[in-house]
Amino acid sequence: MAETAVHQFPLRIYYEDTDAGGIVYYANYLRFAERARSEMLRAAGIESARLMAEDRVALAVRRCAVDYLKPARLDDEVVVETEVVKVGGASLDARQVVRRGGEALVRMELKLGCMSLDGGVARMPAELRRRLRDFVDGETTRAIQG
Amino acid sequence: MAETAVHQFPLRIYYEDTDAGGIVYYANYLRFAERARSEMLRAAGIESARLMAEDRVALAVRRCAVDYLKPARLDDEVVVETEVVKVGGASLDARQVVRRGGEALVRMELKLGCMSLDGGVARMPAELRRRLRDFVDGETTRAIQG
Amino acid sequence: MAETAVHQFPLRIYYEDTDAGGIVYYANYLRFAERARSEMLRAAGIESARLMAEDRVALAVRRCAVDYLKPARLDDEVVVETEVVKVGGASLDARQVVRRGGEALVRMELKLGCMSLDGGVARMPAELRRRLRDFVDGETTRAIQG
Amino acid sequence: MAETAVHQFPLRIYYEDTDAGGIVYYANYLRFAERARSEMLRAAGIESARLMAEDRVALAVRRCAVDYLKPARLDDEVVVETEVVKVGGASLDARQVVRRGGEALVRMELKLGCMSLDGGVARMPAELRRRLRDFVDGETTRAIQG
């Protein structure tokens, strides 16, 4: 259907995530986003360590645009939503939102590329590409959540 | 009884935790340990943000001794075990172990102190002290796990 | 004149900055960029801690768009170039580039806002605004480098 | 002579280093200490990336005991002092102190081991061992500082 699949990853804000301004340090939302993308892949049967060991590739962020709307604070529980927008032969567009109780705190638009560990761009392994396309179609997430 | 209470906190190893040596960066086990202590307190009804806002105190590590036995790696799932050894009027002794599948990777012995946000040592709020003592007695964790 | 002022901040890549892929973890370039902005301000006589204590404000990133062109690696020495593009009453546009030996590795475009520690947007203190405008005019940096 | 060599590494405290308690997060002193050890080695002509690439080894912390005496804060300038206490065939004892204006903030005692990237303990490359012994004798640091 037209319904978009969104992967949900909950996490807690700890001291390590905050700074002397009393809020989450701006770079740390990118750590949260990467954890969420890893868990989305893991839910689809793909592990980063195995991608590196067996296929000699890794997904690397080529571009990200981040909008900081409201800060998260110590002890907050937030959810990172991840949505795959487009899957190409060697790249991937995604959208991620960090929410607290439904309210959007940070929005990210990302372009990731498949990189060979030996340097340069690499075509995505077929299984990875197929699994990611399932996310666009919404099959994988629906399966997870159902 | 004499049985010791141990709080269990599971976590996953992400890219952010590793370094170019392919293993978890040594300082990051202290981040994991702090998350686990926060969750132990939260399980006992104590939140760090509330301690700061209402009681103007924070628990700070005064001393820690860390033994690195085996490294954790990307995608590993580990558990941080936390055990309160002794509770004083303004301080706390704890033991923490990071395990993977039962095997001890890192062992820590810590002394924490209650610090006033205005500087200097502070007596622990009565509720915090009582809750921590429950951990030594094993009541709280047994309640959580049971 | 039309010549733009660019602040230069050199830094070294350590183990803590890298990940199991053997390169700098993508969120860490934002840490480097923030160090560089802090040093640019410090060079102009502005310290973050003093801004918070005396003016009850902090500069916060509202938006950043990051292009990852080439990765930095362990032991690399890189330079973060910072350029103030526009200074408003409560906001600031900046461009930052992380370079290694002249080659651009990461490019960032940022919008920062002046935030009150009590919440909400705040007008920038006059001294801060004046100092930042000097950067746009190129006076401050030329003074530093000359 | 009996005079001990101490390597000095200055660094600045940035937002990324602090937490919502307004002070440097406890794990981050270990990051500072590692930077200082890397710079001590670099000053002696040894680079971590080259050790890994050419000798397939890395120095890993096996044990560290950390005493937190006073906190560092945003914008502080601190110095990490590093002293090599003993050099064995595959291990190394060191002492590190983080100071602000001469005052000791954090004291660390460390045992490092030489680890093969293929797993297990490895004998230190002869050049590394010789350079480290120079630090114990005080020759290298005197050369650097003189």
Image (cartoon, coloured by chain):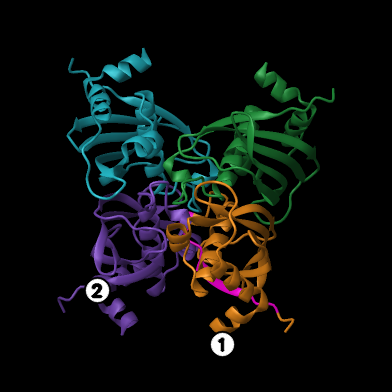
Chain colours: A orange, B purple, C green, D cyan
Inspect this view and state whether residue C52 appears.
Answer: yes
Q: Is residue A136 above or below residue A38?
A: below
Looking at the rendered image, the quarter that the C terminus of chain B falls into is: bottom left
Drawn side of residue B74 relative to residue C104, left or right:
left
Q: Is residue B84 visible?
A: no
Tell whether position A10 is magenta: yes
- Left or right, C1 with reference to C33: right
Query: Is disc 1 surrounded by few (<14), some (14 to 19) or many (20+) residues within 10 Å?
Result: few
Residue that carries the numbered disc 2 in the rendered image: B5
Mark 2 surroundings: few (<14), some (14-19) or many (≥20) residues within 10 A: many
Residue found farthest to the right: C1
Compare residues B94 and A39 and report the one nearer the observer: A39
Is residue C39 rendered magenta in the image?
A: no
- Tag 2 near tag 1, CB within 8 Å: no
Disc 2 is placed on an element classified as: loop
- The spot of residue C17 in percent (x, y) is 48, 44
Type of amino acid at the residue the image marks with label 2: Ala
> In percent of the image, x 74 and y 49: which residue is there?
C122
Rounded to the nearest angstrom, the CA distance separating label 2 from label 1 is 36 Å
- Which amino acid type corresponds to the residue marked 1 in the rendered image? Gly
* Picture quarter with the N terminus of chain B: bottom left
Same chain? Circles 2 and 1 = no
Task: Specify whether B32 is left or right of C119.
Answer: left
Question: What is the chain identity of the residue bearing mark 2?
Answer: B
Where is A18 relative to A8, above or below? above
Per the rendered image, the range of residues in magenta is A4-16
Residue reaching furthest to the top: D146
Where is mark 1, residue-wise? A146
